[in-house]
Amino acid sequence: MIHDTKKDERANVFDAIYEANIGSYLGVPVYLQNGKMYGTVCAIDPEPYAFTQDEIEVMERLSSIFAVILENATNSSCNTVDDKLMRLEKLALLGQLSAGLAHELRNPMQSVKGFVQFLFEDQVDNHFRDIVLSEIDQMDNLIHDFLLVTQPTAPKKGHYDINEVVCETVEFIQSKAALHNVEMSVSVDSDKFDVYVDRIQIKQVMINILKNAIEAVEESGKVMINVSTIGNKEVTIEVVDNGIGIPIAVIGRLGEPFFSTKEGGTGLGLSISKRIIQEHKGTISFENKKDGTKVTITLPK
């Protein structure tokens, strides 16, 4: 505490005090729980001023408040880093296990499928055979998705009209929407907009997003797809549904392998989609709306 910087010898070594024309100074240290001083809370006056005991106590209380805020912010930051490291470790382990696991599962599955077809080949209509083959195909698809997450392939890019890619995908999945009595609509703000992408991978992303949207809405629900351009550099694809929405507590985990809000879901679809968009130098985000969910995909030209 310096009541008069012009007369106090302690102020002689601080050129900044004179440059800033500070007449009086009160500094209270901010200590963290580990005993380290983070900094100081300062009060200054351009004129000489004698700080009262009440003012000193106010500054000390402010110092304690700032210490708590800083401590919480530091802990929150550390927790975030720890969470990301844990996720990276999970993904690394997943990648190491995937190749061997896929081969170990796929080989006997193909053998079982062949024997099932052989045993029932003389029967024209067999309900149990169809169930077994359907389940085997579903397992094969799951392993395929698993490999896409853990052993990604580089995108084979070309110049394609994004409007055409989106419309083709919507047409492909229209039958699933009709099955759930869901109305789908597409809106574009330009006749043509070429993007440098892997056409098959982007269609796969759109299929994954649209399937989730269709499954999220109730019967007679709506899914709207909006395609808009940002200048001549980016395109934005928005998929908006009027479903039940995503719990705010877990929205940050969407795209993590094997995390899903759907019963029986694996979370691999969104994980694959997120990776594909990242490899295209784009972004994908999820947002809770008042009456549903909005997924926004941005791709560079």
Image (cartoon, rainbow, N blue to C red):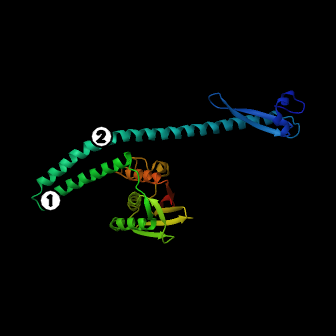
Say if 140 sits above or below 215 in the image. above
Residue type at the position of mark 1: Asn
Q: Quadrant of residue 160?
A: bottom left
Say if 228 sits above or below 34 in the image. below
Which type of secondary structure does the marked residue at label 2 adopt?
helix
- Could you say which is closer to the camera, residue 107 or residue 197? 197
Q: From this viewpoint, is residue 131 visible?
A: yes
In the visual, does 103 lie left or right of 222? left
> Outermost residue, left direction?
122
- Could you say which is closer to the camera, residue 54 or residue 188? 188
Q: Could you tell me which residue is drawn at 48 percent across and 38 percent down?
A: 85
Residue type at the position of mark 2: Gly
The disc placed on residue 29 is none
In the visual, does 152 lie left or right of 296? left
Q: Quadrant of residue 131?
A: bottom left
Which residue lies under the disc numbered 2? 100
The disc placed on residue 126 is 1
